Amino acid sequence: MMDQESVNSINGCIYKFGPIKNLERTLKEITLGFSPLESFNDAYESEFGIAHFFHSLEDEKKLLSPVKTPLDKIQRLSQKYLDTIKVTCFSRIPTNNLMWAHYANNHKGVCYAFDFSKQQPPFQEKNIAWGGVIYSSYVPELKIYQDQTTEGMLPSLLSDVILTKSQEWSYEEEIRFYHSKDTVSEQYRVESLKAVILGRRVNSNDRVDIKKWVDEYNKENKTNVKILYAHRIARTYTLGINSNEGFQKNSETSFSAKIPVLSGIISEPLTTITDDDD
């Protein structure tokens, strides 16, 4: 459940989850961090297979000799390129409990809402590739054609490797932005940040700090970043987003529905104690 103001302020956004400890730096430096693929928590991250197509069986036998094989070179060059890749990850949804648990310090962290209504990356740097993650039961396969596929084509072919994950991760609804530069952070456009959503377990002291940091950001950059609140929708295990801090607590208050007792029933009750039961 979202109130209309909340819906309007984050309509068309993508979402990045993170801990409180990074929030002040993120707002003051106007940067988001990028990480190498090997640092991610997926054990199958960036793994792939190779399908090589030869002109003939004779060429296959020659090229796949026990002494030297082009597949080793392809594997080595591909891995060398993947080792240079740095990625930052977003989600299409802000209300997945697992995302809050895994990436926002068990709801003690925050979720940034960045405008993506025009499919324009939120970064100032133009040469940042991006794509929605493909979820599959099979690792991606590089298709290499004899005398046609060149080393310069590998970055394009490896985009599927960077953007493919196991079906088990599909709940993340992930969008990835990546580059092969040495930098570990990139500046985002100040106007692209639309809201900071607080987790359900953010304490009162952190809330004071967050409000101060967001106010400073808005004053410095002449923006209107909203502070929103994740909450449990009453009587469900479903997350909602609201702009009213008080609504967060009120919506999570447990209550019992009042069921009226009907009067004027003439027939005997199904269960009762009588003198014969003594």
Image (cartoon, grey):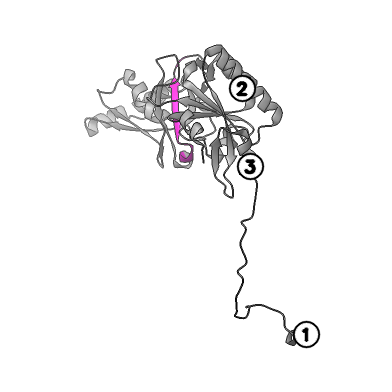
For the record, the magenta segment spans: 170-181
In percent of the image, x 47 and y 18: which residue is there? 191
Residue 5 in the figure: left or right of residue 164: right
Q: Earlier in the sequence, mark 2 or mark 1?
A: 2
Mark nearest the camera among 1 and 3 is 3
Q: Quadrant of the C terminus?
A: bottom right
Residue 25, percent across and down? 60, 17
In percent of the image, x 55 and y 35: which residue is there? 242
Whether residue 141 appears in this view of the structure is yes
Secondary structure beneath dot 3 equals helix
Q: Which residue is farthest bottom? A: 276
Specify few, some or many for label 3: CA neighbours under 10 Å numbering under 14, 14-19, or 20 or more.
Answer: few
* Residue 235: numbered disc: none
Residue 3, percent across and down? 51, 37
Secondary structure beneath dot 1 equals loop
Q: Earlier in the sequence, mark 1 or mark 3?
A: 3
Residue carrying label 2? 22
Residue 100 in the figure: left or right of residue 181: right
Q: Quadrant of residue 261?
A: bottom right
Vertical placement of residue 254 versus 222, above or below: below
Marks 3 and 2 close (CB-CB < 8 Å): no
Specify few, some or many for label 2: CA neighbours under 10 Å numbering under 14, 14-19, or 20 or more.
Answer: few
Vertical placement of residue 264 versus 57, above or below: below
Secondary structure beneath dot 2 equals helix
Vertical placement of residue 260 versus 72, above or below: below
* Residue 250: numbered disc: 3
Kind of residue at disc 3: Asn
Specify few, some or many for label 1: CA neighbours under 10 Å numbering under 14, 14-19, or 20 or more.
Answer: few
Residue carrying label 1? 278
